[in-house]
Image (cartoon, coloured by chain):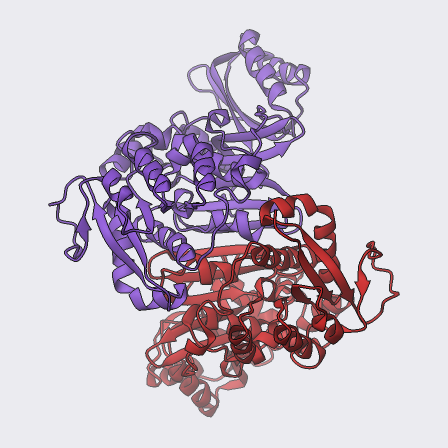
Chain colours: A purple, B red
Amino acid sequence: MSAPLRLGIAGLGTVGIGVVKIIQFHADLIALRAGRPVQITAICARDRHKNRDADLSMYEWAEGARELAARDDIDVFVELIGGDEGVARDAIEIALATGKDVVTANKALLAMHGQALAETAEAAGRVIRFEAAVAGGIPVIKTITESMAGNRIRRVMGVMNGTCNYILTRMQSAGLPYDTVFEEARQLGYLEADPTLDVGGIDAGHKLSILAALAFGTQPAFDAVEIEGIERVSIDDINRAADMGYRIKLLGVAQMTARGLEQRMSPCLVPADSPLGQLEGGTNMVVIEGDAVGQIVLRGAGAGAGPTASAVMSDIVEIARGVRLPVFGQPAVTLARPQAARTAVPAAYYLRLMLADKPGALAKVATVLGDSGISIDRMRQYGHAAGEAPVLIVTHKTTPEAIDHAIEALPRTGVITGEPVELRIEEV
Amino acid sequence: MSAPLRLGIAGLGTVGIGVVKIIQFHADLIALRAGRPVQITAICARDRHKNRDADLSMYEWAEGARELAARDDIDVFVELIGGDEGVARDAIEIALATGKDVVTANKALLAMHGQALAETAEAAGRVIRFEAAVAGGIPVIKTITESMAGNRIRRVMGVMNGTCNYILTRMQSAGLPYDTVFEEARQLGYLEADPTLDVGGIDAGHKLSILAALAFGTQPAFDAVEIEGIERVSIDDINRAADMGYRIKLLGVAQMTARGLEQRMSPCLVPADSPLGQLEGGTNMVVIEGDAVGQIVLRGAGAGAGPTASAVMSDIVEIARGVRLPVFGQPAVTLARPQAARTAVPAAYYLRLMLADKPGALAKVATVLGDSGISIDRMRQYGHAAGEAPVLIVTHKTTPEAIDHAIEALPRTGVITGEPVELRIEEV
């Protein structure tokens, strides 16, 4: 058996402690699978004296992550601090510069600086692995870069923020408005310190940009992700969508088109009886489509100490086994900067309008849609209350431009009140 | 860029031609991802002159698979012939003895002789990879051996024979009896030459024994798989199970218990609204449970040229990248011979009886169940016809032994006609 693989772990939150516990509890199993022991040499965290419900007495403590990364008695620097700037980034750069491989769960850092880090790592002959950065315990990075290596990938889709999916499914099951469930989620500790990262779609957008880079051989381009959060999803739309056989999900979609790379993270309708539609609570799901394999669906826990630590461990074991792949599955210098394209792939859309109680009102709406080149698949008008009536429309496949045109023109008819709501119905 | 990886492909059926086409169409993509070109040097098949709808003119033809395996101008022998004896096995042994790595989709061979082949390969410093052998394009081998390397695996479950799932879902959707749908499947070309391999559960049993070896660190032990095929599943039971909210699936379950390794491939009931219950047609699904990651569900095409060739390509690219892992995820000499245990994990059961139209009949059945230690969760008696009435019983969790006891005792009551049907309800 070869020499032990020596780890330095920076960050001892739930994930960091999860990794420590796996290494402690499954030392023999891991050594057998990795072909060598995996051991923790040194650790660090902001507060050394916090009670962490784990025996850390046998590890050396480093002063900080930068010091830990620079030590000459570790082989792999495990970064579980988080944040796209500051100590996490510095420490990873120090680790690479001083000959260590890196395992990280830091999606923000990879989305923002993944290209530069990958180039640095590959120039230095080091690897960076990050299975835990996307969809927790679900092996999506490995599936795209390894299992689908013989495929041209067509589309990557996914529900990749468990908190948003929890909020949306809880709104539906309990019939509660967004604000109430948001507050519940906060009290349950499901939200990031800055909740915009979750409900604003940013965290999920980071993940999507990483998957897009892997799938399409492009540089990560988080700034080109069209992002819309779930803050404006109303219980009304959730209920109306359900009436029509749909669920609303914060769905990420990335696909390469003739115009360029489309990346979008936004609330979408999906059929209630599809795998994505049936996904409840904090579970994540990623759907990947390749030209040879067809559609692969992966489902599992997207967060939490155990699942995330499991993904971190899979990266550590791969390094222990001597597996050395390019950071994004092909050499970083070969990754093209993507031509970012706004979504242009046609889809059906869900529209909800409040129609004023005036003669000919519905005809005017229908005319605007027709003039925008949109044909109607299904329409429902509900009863009037306070002089207005909700109207739901499911369109046939149309372009986002046609929808934009209609949304702009509809208020000018004078027969609708408030803002029309439009949500894309993604084909899954 | 390093030297090309040179392949010899034995077997040019749909999968073999699928691999050839991927290598032809995606040569640049694969070279970029693998870090070196992947090229086909020589091929062989039983009939050289068959029209295969692919340009094979640039490859050398070998006389046969054994000759191909022995060539000194290939690095990897790709075995797509099939069969657990004869030429496939011989050729793989020749390839290993003459310094080649092996990629195969041959589940029967691995289930029957995987241990010996793994020991041979590892003693010779060669690798054998077989992602395509289980569940087609679904990356289940990689998920167990790599992504879950930090987990103690608790249970592996799956629907892994698309033909059986097609037959069972078609019976339900069309309301047709087994024999009719079996004949349809034969005419559609869905069945193996020996259909018992499919409908007898043997093919799926091979796959289960491979997954169990990977998951539990044991030698493959196909002879210890309890196997029951779908031949005895009646349209009646499919309909009755649906009434009670279940679907019948040919489900494989492997788990390590205190008594030993349980491996079972048999028709089971699963909740209609579970991911397994919703699986229709030829799609496969594998569910893996680990102590850290929880439950991972993988879904995709389990057969077909594209999906299977995609899995073969993932193995080829891994070898091209220099990834060299033990055949079953840990050294073959460390794999324990499993203590095989008959299923003892308690479960709810579905029972269907034909009750004679006699006073006190139901009471006698209930007494036998009670005497066997079985308590009833739900029961339905349907109307009498021709002096007998179907009775459905869903039990609370009980042991297989208790069910066996009841099944043996029930005919002795004199109030049931025909054989009682019992099906396990698997918790998913």
Q: Residue furthest right?
A: B49
The correct choice, above or below, for A334 with respect to B139 in the image is above
Residue A414 at least partly seen: yes
To which quarter of the image does residue A202 belong? top left
The correct choice, above or below, for B134 with respect to B112 in the image is above
Tell me what residue is drawn at x 65 percent, y 16 percent.
A372
Label total for image: 0
Tell me what residue is drawn at x 26 percent, y 46 percent.
A71
To which quarter of the image does residue A262 belong? top right
Q: B294 or A221: which is nearer to us? A: A221
Tell me what residue is drawn at x 54 percent, y 79 percent.
B227
Residue B273 at least partly seen: no
Q: Where's residue B7, x and y in %?
A: 69, 61
Q: Where's residue B333, x and y in %?
A: 44, 78
Q: A339 or A75: which is nearer to us? A: A75
Tell me what residue is drawn at x 50 percent, y 39 percent.
A211
On the rendered image, what quadrant is the C terminus of chain B found in?
Answer: bottom left
To which quarter of the image does residue B377 belong? bottom left
Q: Where's residue A409, x and y in %?
A: 58, 11
Q: Where's residue A266, x and y in %?
A: 47, 30
Q: Residue furthest bottom?
A: B412
Q: B145 or A187: which is nearer to us? A: B145
Q: A346 or A140: which is nearer to us? A: A140
